[in-house]
Image (cartoon, rainbow, N blue to C red):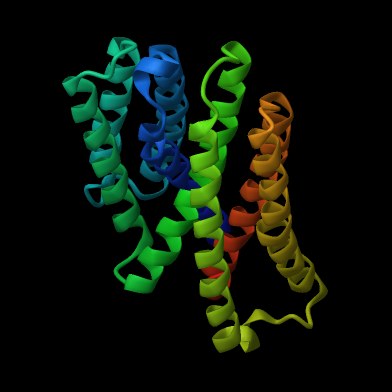
């Protein structure tokens, strides 16, 4: 039960961090304030749920809930005030939001450097794909927008995937005895992690990139919806393995 509880909270904090982190890829003047208000709303809802769960389970035992409240106030303010041109005040809010989420994840993940690297990379890949899906949907509103931001998200995704695969392989080789792969349930979810979280994401990202180059944004967005499902499942399983077995997958 503890593993599921921690996994759910981490998932919401990670989604918030990853989505807002990559928002500067998009030029505010080109995409308009409406897109950033949408992003801030999504992040605000996720952060509210995660902070509320944390307070219910752990109370105010450290500064994490206060960072959550500070981030929430910033998301709320920027959702209301964001214009088509990102002002200095909006950049200040952006750095407040990113800073709060970095502090939250640092407190949530634990003191180990390897934990921090693993969880921050998970947060980034989870948020990046969700951000890309949201961005692709925005092209349906304005199909004349440049496809360059979507291409950039795919390039970053490939880099993160390569890093995660190498990191997971090293962890698996050093700790495979703890995984209890003889247990059919553990073997099934381990296989799902490898296939859904890595192989399928890699294949779908390649097809997405090809469609983006062809300016078939609607089709690419459809694949991004599918990728969002698989990355959600893959990272949830990955975090479950850590909280259950202490293994980075």
Task: Give 141 or 58, whichever is nearer the viewer.
Answer: 141
At which x and y percent is residue 3? 55, 61
Quarter containing the N terminus: bottom right
* Residue depicted at 33% across the width and 72% down the height: 112
As drawn, 129 above or below 141: below
At which x and y percent is residue 169? 59, 77
Outermost residue on the right side: it is 184
* Residue depicted at 39% across the width and 45% down the height: 54
As drawn, 229 above or below 34: below
Q: Is residue 96 left or right of residue 183?
A: left
* Residue depicted at 36% across the width and 50% down the height: 58
Outermost residue on the front side: it is 214
The image quadrant of residue 121 is bottom left
Q: Count of labels shown?
A: 0
The image quadrant of residue 23 is top left
Task: Give 27 or 239, whichever is nearer the viewer.
Answer: 27
Quarter containing the C terminus: bottom right
At which x and y percent is residue 74? 26, 26
* Residue 53 appears in the figure: no
* Residue depicted at 39% across the width and 65% down the height: 117
* Residue 183 appears in the figure: yes
Task: Give 113 or 50, whichever is nearer the viewer.
Answer: 113
At which x and y percent is residue 158? 56, 55
As drawn, 71 above or below 84: below
């Amino acid at each position: 039960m503890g593993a599921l509880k921690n996994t759910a909270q981490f998932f919401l904090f990670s989604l918030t961090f990853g989505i807002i982190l990559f928002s500067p890829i998009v030029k505010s003047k080109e995409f308009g304030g409406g897109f950033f208000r949408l992003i801030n709303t999504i992040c605000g809802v996720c952060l509210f749920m995660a902070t509320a769960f944390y307070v219910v389970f752990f109370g105010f035992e450290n500064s994490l809930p206060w960072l959550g409240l500070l981030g929430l106030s910033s998301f709320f303010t920027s959702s209301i005030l964001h214009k088509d041109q990102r002002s200095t005040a909006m950049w200040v809010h952006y750095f407040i939001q990113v800073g709060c989420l970095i502090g939250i994840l640092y407190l949530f993940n634990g003191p180990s450097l390897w934990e921090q690297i693993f969880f921050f990379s998970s947060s980034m890949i989870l948020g990046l794909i969700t951000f890309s899906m949201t961005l692709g949907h925005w092209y349906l509103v304005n199909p004349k927008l440049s496809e360059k931001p979507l291409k950039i998200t795919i390039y970053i995704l490939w880099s993160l995937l390569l890093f995660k695969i190498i990191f997971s392989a090293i962890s698996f080789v050093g700790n495979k005895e703890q995984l209890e792969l003889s247990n059919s349930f553990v073997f099934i979810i381990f296989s799902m992690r490898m296939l859904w979280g890595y192989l399928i994401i890699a294949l779908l990202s390649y097809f997405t990139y090809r469609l983006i180059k062809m300016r078939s944004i609607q089709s690419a967005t459809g694949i991004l919806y599918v990728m969002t499902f698989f990355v959600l499942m893959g990272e949830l399983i990955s975090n479950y393995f850590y909280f259950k077995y202490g293994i980075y997958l």
